[in-house]
Image: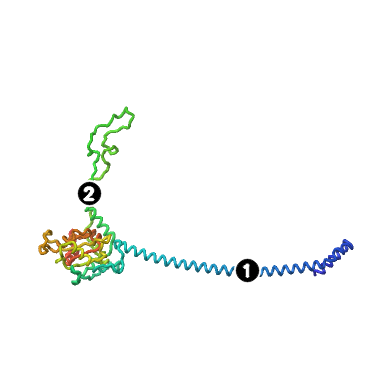
Amino acid sequence: SASASASASSASASAVFGGGGARAWSGAPRAMALVATATASASSTSSSSTTSWGARAMGDGRATARTTARMFASDASATAAAATAKTTWDEEADADADDARLGSRTLDASSSSGVMDVRWNISETQGKGMDATIAVYGIDGERRGEVTLPGRIFDAPLRVDIAHRVVRWQRARAQSGLHKTKSRGEVSGTTRKARPQKGQGRARVGNLKAPQMRGGGTAHGPVVRSHEHSLPKKVRRLGLKVALSAKAAEGKIIVVDTFAGLEPKTRAMKDLLERLTGDVGLAAGGVYHSSLIVDGEFEEGDEDAIESEAVTPNALVRLSSRNLPHVQVLPQIGLNVYSILKHRSLILTRGGLEQLISRLDAPINR
């Protein structure tokens, strides 16, 4: 077709330009053939280049897919490593919280809880009013029998709001309320007018004992008063049961048979607390034990007597513990919510426990 087109073009040139034109276009068929060959070659080259570009693009796609897969795998590994690190960090934070709760001491296998069965997690059955049986120990740390803690007193629901109300009521009653400032009528000084009302170009002023004056009285200052407020007896009794139940749920109640035979010395009481409460009963700082000791009704006795025969058992406890800063001794009638929550452990004598149960089971006097 290229030769036919070239012949037609040559004939047209001869007709138009004459011989000169024919001579000028004599090589046209060859030129057109070369053009057709070049066009075919270019098409072939373009097709091959397109094919090679597609192959390269496919190869690049595969490489990109492999890179993306590697990136996702790397991200998954990083995510798993971050999750593992977070879990480890959470466990370490929980361990640090336990250490802080123990008073800057490390809770490890070497830590001792004495005879207490300490529970760091509250049981799901707590608050169901179930009776519990615990051991009774002597002052030597040996087991002397068992005693039952009634669930109606030592397994009440842990009502934080009730405990808060009772503690506020106690602290308000304990506040002396002796704060006092002088008002303008109580400040010593003259009552005359400081200067004339007019004529000096200064502000008008009257009594120099006014609150805005230097050395004057205090406006709306505190006065001597009682901070006590009323609280129903039912709420007070319920608060005591909540505090006792909290200590029982933690396993920090110890029942001692009697303190008879205890040497009236601070060292003897310190060794006794070490046997009963161990390291868990230590106050913040890890030096002194924090314990509330509750006995029955205090008997009359001479606490200054040295001979143990002349001193009653509860007087022995008071004598041997009065130099320990975080140990408090109370009769069962003086047991209160604030003292229970303040100390790490609660130590009851068998007689004191029986009197306490009898008192809390008695009807409330209206």
Q: Position of residue 212 (x, y in %)?
A: 29, 38
Nearer to us in this view, 47 or 194 = 47
Name the mark on residue 233: none
Q: Where is residue 365 in the image (x, y as percent from the top left)?
A: 17, 59
Under mark 1, the amino acid is Arg
Which residue position is annotated with label 1?
Answer: 56
Q: What element carries label 1?
A: helix
Dot 1 or dot 2: first in sequence order is: 1
Residue 242 makes an appearance in the image: no
Is the residue 366 above or below the residue 119 in the image?
above
Q: Where is residue 290 in the image (x, y as percent from the top left)?
A: 24, 61
Which residue position is annotated with label 2?
Answer: 177
Quarter of the figure with the C terminus: bottom left
Quarter of the figure with the N terminus: bottom right
Direction from residue 57 to residue 82 in the image, left or right: left
Residue furthest to the left: 310
Residue furthest to the top: 199
The colour mode here is: rainbow
| Residue at 42%, 67% in the rendered image | 84
Disc 1 versus disc 2: nearer the observer: 1
Q: Quadrant of residue 334?
A: bottom left
Under mark 2, the amino acid is Gly
Q: Where is residue 32 in the image (x, y as percent from the top left)?
A: 80, 67
Direction from residue 26 to residue 181 in the image, left or right: left
Residue 9 makes an appearance in the image: yes
The Cα–Cα distance between marks 1 and 2, rounded to whole angstroms, is 91 Å
Q: In which quarter of the image is residue 27?
A: bottom right
10 Å neighbourhood of mark 2: few (<14), some, or many (≥20)?
Answer: some
Q: Quadrant of residue 57?
A: bottom right
